Image (cartoon, rainbow, N blue to C red):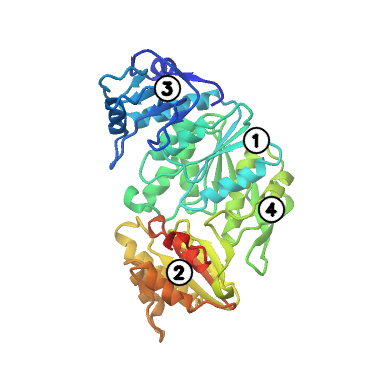
Amino acid sequence: MISPLSLQQLQGRFGGELVNGSVQFERVCTDTRKIDSQALFVALKGENFDAHDFVLELESAGELDGQVLGLVVDREIPGCRLPQWRVANTTVALGQIGRLCRDQFKGRVIAITGSCGKTTVKEMLAAIFAQRHNPCVTRGNLNNQFGLPMTLFGLCADHDVLILEMGASGPDEIGYLCGIGKPQVSAVNNVMPAHVEGFGSVDAIARAKGQIYTGLEVGGTAVVNVDDGYANYWLDQMPEGVHTLEVGLGHQCAISADNIELTESGCPSFDLVVEGLAHLVQLQLLGEHNVHNALVAAGCAFAAGVPAAEIASGLGGLGGVAGRMQELKGLSGAAIIDDSYNANPGSVAAAIELLAQRHGRKILVLGDMAELGPDADAMHREIGRLARERGLDTLFTLGPLGAAASVAFSAGRHQPLHNYRERAPLLAALTHELNENTTVLVKGSRSARMELVVQALTGNDKEDK
């Protein structure tokens, strides 16, 4: 934290009840496995856990004193003498603590959301700003109502830029996060079918993501990817007094890309055109889709005052992002492209396009794409059809939904289906396909645990041994 906070400050700003007085704190803890004696403990509740039970157990054993400085709870803890802020909802209270930390920060705040690529855009921004600034950046995928406040707790006095990734699995979550993070520059990277079950439709996803724009205050800047099908919708909904900066492949945009070429390995180079002036960028990331990610990152950085030449330099300096189009050396000399972090139909289509451009045999290993709603089978069939049309040699699928993709891929081909319900038989069959002339791209939703397939194909499967 930039400076200590107190329970009295929180109660005075947001209400609730103080019990056993106040206490100052500089750290916040929510994990019962990592209790911190110098931190305020927030007892969160979820579908399958309630940290109040842990607090009650410690108190009953006479072990709570000295474990933490104070508590945030939603009910009485009998016998507890620690200072407490008693509230109606501890998750909301966590966000309110984050909001006070945000209020202490005087630097630029940038927020990114989107169906896919938002973590890559975040890392691109971090690389751009790290050249001359000290950015505070969302760690990993801590981008929801629990994770975003934790990023704000990590703000320090020497940070001068805050880069927030915002994720959502249902309506109004982005608006809630904007109310905590208060961004001055915002961007939606794209909208694709992802978490459809939580939103109900792709249109609803677009409306929810658009809250990152409607949450901007007067004087803020909305970076709009005009290549996305919902760009005009967002522009029509833009609040009065919010500036817009359009990015995209078209030359009419303030920031665009020209002369896109791919290296032999599949890394794009292009001219980053900013207000009519071109700056050469050579990305170290695989896939032409990363040009779109780079344009959104460039727009956010430019809106925050970074010179165009510095943006181009930062984009070119970013290495691979774990689990996202990283090329690794596999067993038997095969090339393994690890894109296992997550998947939706749009990101899988981009992965197929990258793989189709490789030399030699091309194998896609796809875990089930989750949370696609009632159209899940149709979307998997479409992916199988696309893989067949783009000339991939083999499709291995893992999970029940993958059967639809495998059937569509094999239509008209004289080859067996490679759909598996378990990881072990998939790996047994796939390992025989590996050689120096083969590229294997691995992708799937988080629930499919496709990183374990990558570990096995690269000889790093310690977890399964």
Q: Nearer the viewer, residue 459 or 173?
A: 459
Q: CA distance from mark 3 to mark 1?
A: 30 Å
Q: Amino acid at mark 3?
A: Leu
Across and down, in percent, residue 221 comes to 57, 36
Q: Residues within 10 Å of mark 1 (few under 14, many from 20)?
A: some
Q: Secondary structure at mark 4?
A: helix
Q: Where is mark 4, residue-wise?
A: 316
**Foreground disc of the pair 1, 4:** 1
Q: Where is mark 1, residue-wise?
A: 134
Q: CA distance from mark 2 to mark 3?
A: 49 Å
Mark 2 in CB contact with mark 4 (< 8 angstroms) = no
Q: Nearer the viewer, residue 322 or 288?
A: 322
Q: Residues within 10 Å of mark 2 (few under 14, many from 20)?
A: many
> Which callout, 3 or 1, points at the residue further toward the start of the chain?
3
Q: Where is mark 2, residue-wise?
A: 365
Q: Residues within 10 Å of mark 4 (few under 14, many from 20)?
A: many
> Which callout, 3 or 4, points at the residue further toward the start of the chain?
3
Q: Secondary structure at mark 1?
A: loop
> Which callout, 1 or 4, points at the residue further toward the start of the chain?
1
Query: Which quadrant of the figure has residue 90?
Result: top left
Q: CA distance from mark 2 to mark 4?
A: 29 Å
**Foreground disc of the pair 3, 4:** 3
Q: CA distance from mark 3 to mark 4?
A: 45 Å
Q: Amino acid at mark 4?
A: Gly
